[in-house]
Amino acid sequence: MLRFRPIVNIVLVVLLLMAVGAVFWLRRPAQPGYLDSVNLTPPPIPDDLFVGNELMPPVPLAEFDLMNHTGKRVSNTDFHGKTTLLTFAYTSCPDTCPVMFGRFLGVQQEFGAVIGADVELVFVTVDPEVDTPERLQRHAEAMDGKWYFLTEELAVMQKVWEDFRVHVEKEGALVGHSNVTYLIDDLGLIRVRYSGLPPTSVFVADLQKLLEE
Amino acid sequence: MQKWFGCGILLLWLLTACAAKPDIYVEDAWMRPDPMMENAAGYMTIHNDGNADDALIGVQAEFAKMASAHETVMDDATHRMEAVPRLAIPAGETVVFQPLSYHIMLMGLHAPLEYGQAVNLTLEFEKSGQIVVASEVRRE
């Protein structure tokens, strides 16, 4: 028995040290896990950036010559010297376009008298066979929209959609289309592109930023 | 013999009472007509609190020429609307109709709707049958 005693003592000391080590290891401060190292909150957007997708370099507005809802000819050069928000929609659209009309009405409310002077809101139809100038006029009046609503013959519109990268698919009375909006500066350069239906606040922030430039 | 017959009836009654069935209820029904009052889109929340699946298989509206369930789908950056002839409402689940998602498409309004008024939509379910829902007309 005595022969083994030193070995037993050593084993006991080692076990004791292991136990103490285990206690310290278990009570160590919590290590950050993988998810803790990932910042889940988006960083604040610096003041000098647009919320939408800024085009670098800016792209000149494609040329167009269309009919306004009041029956007047309107071309791309009519928006030079103004800051313009331009998007695509159609009047008999039941689900998506009303959201966009609401967003533009929100912008109109926010900027008040500046709309029609320094800032212009423009809708371009994706349903020219139905959206005649008279119909667009009635629509603007019903919504109290202080905007341009542009249309023309189908062939002319097809060229415009192509230039603005808008995919249009007519299916009976409904029209499937890309929801794309462009923010254009006073030099006629497309500065920001929006995909989908961003909230009014996004348009307001970017318009304000562009107006302050 | 009579006793067994009675037991059989009781068992049948119990089985019927416990049989799985859906329990559909609809809330927050509203609709937004386009500004020219030609078409409208209806939105709502459909709950199935029962223990059997059900499905929305039809919609009727007296105030429109055509009513049907649709879904707005995003396909290659293009929003398009697709008809949904049968929409499953699984047991214990909720299906929300909202802008840019499921909606009731109401084409060809017979007369302009008034904001604030409630109009009836008749929803037809595979198992629960017809349910009439009062839907408020809203601008936004």
Image (cartoon, helix red, strand yellow):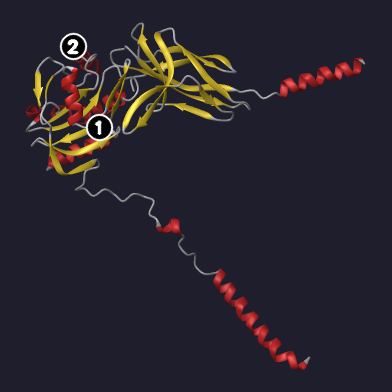
Res A150 visible:
no
Residue A182 x/y as whole percent = 20, 34
Q: Which residue is mark 2?
A: A134
Which residue type does callout 1 highlight? Val
Q: What subunit carries mark 1?
A: A
Q: Residues within 10 Å of mark 2 (few under 14, many from 20)?
A: few
Find the distance from the CA under tag 1 to the CA under tag 2: 25 Å
Pointers 1 and 2 in contact (CB under 8 A)?
Answer: no
Q: Nearer the viewer, residue A10 or A213?
A: A10
| A192 to B54, vertically: above or below | below
Residue A87 location (% of width, % of height):
22, 28
Say yes or no: labels 1 and 2 on the same chain. yes
Q: State the residue at coordinates (34%, 49%).
A: A42
The residue labelled by disc 1 is A180
* Chain to which mark 2 belongs: A
> Residue A137, image x and y in percent?
19, 14
Which is nearer the eye, A143 or A180?
A180
* Label 1: element kind: strand
> Is A33 positioned to the left or the right of A105 in the image?
right
Q: Identify which residue, A78 or A121, lies in the foreground.
A: A78
Above or below: residue B49 compared with residue A51: above
Q: Give the crowd class for mark 1: few <14, some 14-19, many >=20 residues within 10 Å.
A: many
Question: Would you identify the image quadrant in which residue A145 lies?
Answer: top left
- Viewport quadrant of the N terminus of chain A: bottom right
Q: Amino acid at mark 2?
A: Glu
Q: Earlier in the sequence, mark 1 or mark 2?
A: 2
- Judged from the image, the secondary structure of the residue bearing numbered disc 2 is helix
Q: Residue drawn at (17%, 31%), measured in percent from left and top?
A: A163
